[in-house]
Amino acid sequence: MIQYGRQSINEDDISAVAEVLRGDWLTTGPTVTAFEDSLAELSGATRVVSATSGTAALHVAYAAAGVGAGDEVVTTPMTFVATASSAVALGARITFVDVEEDTANIDPAAVDAVVSDATKVVAGVDYAGHPIEVDALRPVADRVGALLLEDAAHSIGSTYKGRPVGSLADLTTFSFFPTKNMTSAEGGAVATLDADLGQRAHEFHFIGLVRDRDRMRYPDEGPWHQEVHEYGLNYRLPDVLAALGLSQLRRLEAFKTRRAEVFARYQEGLAGLDGVRLPVQREHVDPIWHLYPLRVLDGRRREVFDAMRAAGVGVQVNYMPVYWHPLFEDMGYQRGMCPNAEAFYAEELSLPMHAELTDAQVDQVIDAVRTAVAG
């Protein structure tokens, strides 16, 4: 089976983890700081807070934004459920808006039509690694005093109009799950340009602990003293996993190059094939491709999916619209709300995309697509 996605681990990665295991710090140590600092340098952010997963990073980001009971979060249904559910966990009310017909990214015009003074956060997702239209979304969020969050689980290393993802939105979240563009086994991070948001993110992921004596209610309690002023959770990424992330970060440019080569080979090998639609790339973005989202037309996606799996190609579907999940159905969300997203889901088929794919494997996938579509 040609895997749909997988990690790329080399001896440098293994040595980096082993070095931490032989050292004094397994968590809350210097490797975490080094990883966060390197992420900040890459992304153009002024503060990065690592976390135990991409979902945790979203939870941290929404908490840093002050999302609470009754606040509105406007977001896309074309994403993994955590983009919405982590806001729901804080009591937010989710408003789903439709996506652009070509990129499957959140549609700025659809956002503009629904935002109000109740909107706390507008959350877009860089689907497949293609950055959202930040410059169109920014004035919409600013108009109602909302923060802009970029869920960049797919796009660390991408740029938008020459600016790196991480420097574009008020808050940006990353995921380092094994199938993502780089990995720390499990892990994520929140990036921001705002010092106050960064500090709030740090404290929420650190159980809410306050260690600054100038902010303490009881500063004279003793040198051991620390306080919790607001609710927080232990979402701290350990040094062991930060070491893997730091090593992987050094390889990110190579990963990006290889993923671009795979993407281009698919584009060339599937060009002109009737019955499918190929993904697009806008001129002003330089994406790191996390997915290759082929669209299978004429209601044949399930047929082609089954044929590809039978041929030994590990295809996947990304994603069922979030509000189709029973959790959201039970809240009253109904199918038909976002027709572009639902049409995209009905056709989408993710072909294998990772840095370990060989040219021969990519060609095998292309042949399997052509055979399945012709059948």
Image (spheres, rainbow, N blue to C red):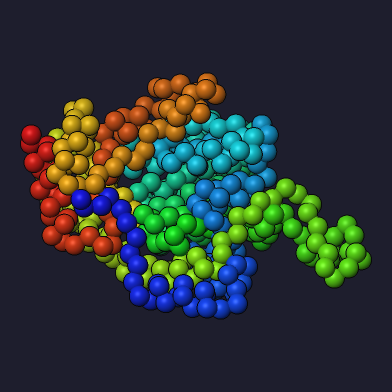
Asked whether residue 136 is in view, the answer is no
* Residue 248 figure quarter: bottom left
Figure check: 61 above or below 255: above
Q: Where residue 87 appears, x then y in whole percent?
A: 58, 39
Figure check: 291 above or below 343: below
Q: Where residue 247 appears, x then y in whole percent?
A: 43, 72
Q: Nearer the viewer, residue 77 or 119?
A: 77
Give the residue at x 15% y 37%: 307
Give the residue at x 52% y 68%: 240
Q: Is residue 93 left or right of residue 101?
A: right
In the rendered picture of this protein, how many numbered marks are placed on residues?
Answer: 0
Figure check: 366 above or below 225: above
Give the residue at x 60% y 67%: 27
Q: Is residue 37 left or right of residue 335?
A: right
Give the residue at x 82% y 68%: 224
Q: Where residue 53 appears, x then y in whole percent?
A: 51, 53
Asked whether residue 345 is in view, the answer is yes
Q: Is residue 218 left or right of residue 305?
A: right
**Quadrant where the image shows the C terminus:** top left
Q: Where residue 75 appears, x then y in whole percent?
A: 50, 38
Farthest residue, direction right: 220
Q: Nearer the viewer, residue 276 or 354?
A: 354
